[in-house]
């Protein structure tokens, strides 16, 4: 395929793994990387390198500079996912980080989502969108997203109508597949309980000591769009 076609084709988790991007992990619709810089000065230098690379490629990532790390997120917003243009820029950013002596920490990246138990998401969706300044998702009707990409997404989990108060929200934590079991083990050691691994490795359901639920999720074990299907 031509570069133009490649840059319009959304890559799934298996496609990204095949690119051997050791520093990066696919979490939902973005490539994520964390580089430990050791100093604010080195972090600022890396951000400057990323800015120059992004301008040259006319493709701009989201970058967070803190002490002592730089977090980077890459996505092709025009098609709603990761494409070869993100892969190319990811390689260049990794090269720049290596030259500056920054250390990649791919096992530390994660994304939090909020799951809302509801019998009618359409009824409450306008409220949450207005309250948080969120937008609807064109590809997933049961989801609301922060347009800035900094706040957790909200997705609806269908439940029966009920009047008795109970837990209505739960956390989903998207992690790289190779870190999921270690994260679960830490949660269990901290007093948690494994409620279900029936859908693993797509997700595991955990609870705290009082029965409040949370899920560890990965991209594995899910139905994905074929790699050669262009985004619409």
Image (cartoon, rainbow, N blue to C red):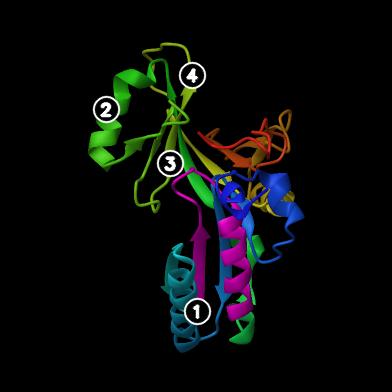
**Relative depth, front residue between 121 and 136:** 136
Query: Residue 191's spot in the image, x, y percent?
Result: 63, 46
Q: Earlier in the sequence, mark 4 or mark 1?
A: 1
User: Can I make out residue 57 in this image?
Assistant: yes
Q: Is residue 85 above or below residue 193?
A: below
Give the magenta range.
69-96
Q: What is the CA distance from the residue labelled 4 to the residue labelled 3?
A: 16 Å
Q: Earlier in the sequence, mark 2 or mark 1?
A: 1
Q: Is residue 37 above or below residue 19?
A: below
Q: Which residue is mark 3?
A: 153
Query: Residue 186's spot in the image, x, y percent?
Result: 67, 53
Can residue 89 be found in the magenta stretch? yes
Q: What is the CA distance from the residue labelled 4 to the residue labelled 2?
A: 17 Å
The answer to whether marks 4 and 3 mark residues whose Cβ atoms lie closer than 8 Å is no
Q: Which residue is mark 1?
A: 68
The answer to whether marks 4 and 1 mark residues whose Cβ atoms lie closer than 8 Å is no
Q: Which residue is mark 2?
A: 126
The answer to whether marks 2 and 1 mark residues whose Cβ atoms lie closer than 8 Å is no
Q: What is the CA distance from the residue labelled 2 to the residue labelled 3?
A: 14 Å
Which residue: 64% across, 81% down?
A: 98
Q: Is residue 118 above or below residue 73?
A: above
Per the image, label 4 sits on a secondary structure element best described as: strand
- Closer to the camera: disc 2 or disc 1? 2
Which residue: 63% across, 68% down?
A: 91
10 Å crowding of disc 2: few (<14), some (14-19), many (20+): some
Which residue: 44% across, 46% down?
A: 78
Q: What is the CA distance from the residue labelled 3 to the residue labelled 1?
A: 27 Å
Which residue: 74% across, 61% down?
A: 20
Q: What is the CA distance from the residue labelled 4 to the residue labelled 1?
A: 41 Å
10 Å crowding of disc 1: few (<14), some (14-19), many (20+): some
């Amino acid at each position: 395929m031509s570069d133009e076609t490649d840059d319009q084709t959304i890559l799934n988790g298996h496609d990204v793994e095949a690119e051997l991007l050791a520093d990066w992990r696919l979490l939902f619709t973005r490539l994520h990387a964390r580089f430990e810089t050791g100093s604010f000065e080195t972090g600022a230098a890396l951000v400057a390198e990323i800015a120059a690379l992004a301008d040259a490629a006319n493709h701009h990532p989201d970058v967070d500079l803190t002490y002592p790390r730089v977090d980077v997120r890459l996505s092709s917003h025009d098609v709603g996912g990761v494409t070869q243009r993100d892969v190319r820029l990811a390689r260049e950013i990794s090269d720049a980080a290596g030259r500056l002596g920054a250390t990649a920490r791919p096992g530390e990246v994660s994304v939090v989502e909020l799951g809302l138990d509801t019998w009618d998401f359409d009824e409450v969706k306008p409220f949450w969108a207005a309250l948080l300044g969120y937008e609807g998702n064109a590809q997933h009707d049961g989801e609301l997203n922060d347009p800035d990409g900094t706040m957790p997404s909200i997705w609806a989990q269908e439940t029966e109508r009920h009047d008795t108060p109970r837990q209505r929200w739960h956390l989903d934590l998207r992690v790289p597949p190779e870190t999921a079991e270690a994260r679960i083990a830490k949660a269990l050691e901290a007093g948690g309980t494994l409620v279900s691994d029936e859908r693993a490795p797509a997700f595991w359901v955990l609870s705290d000591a009082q029965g409040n639920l949370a899920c560890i999720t990965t991209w594995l074990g899910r139905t994905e769009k074929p790699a050669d299907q262009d985004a619409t």
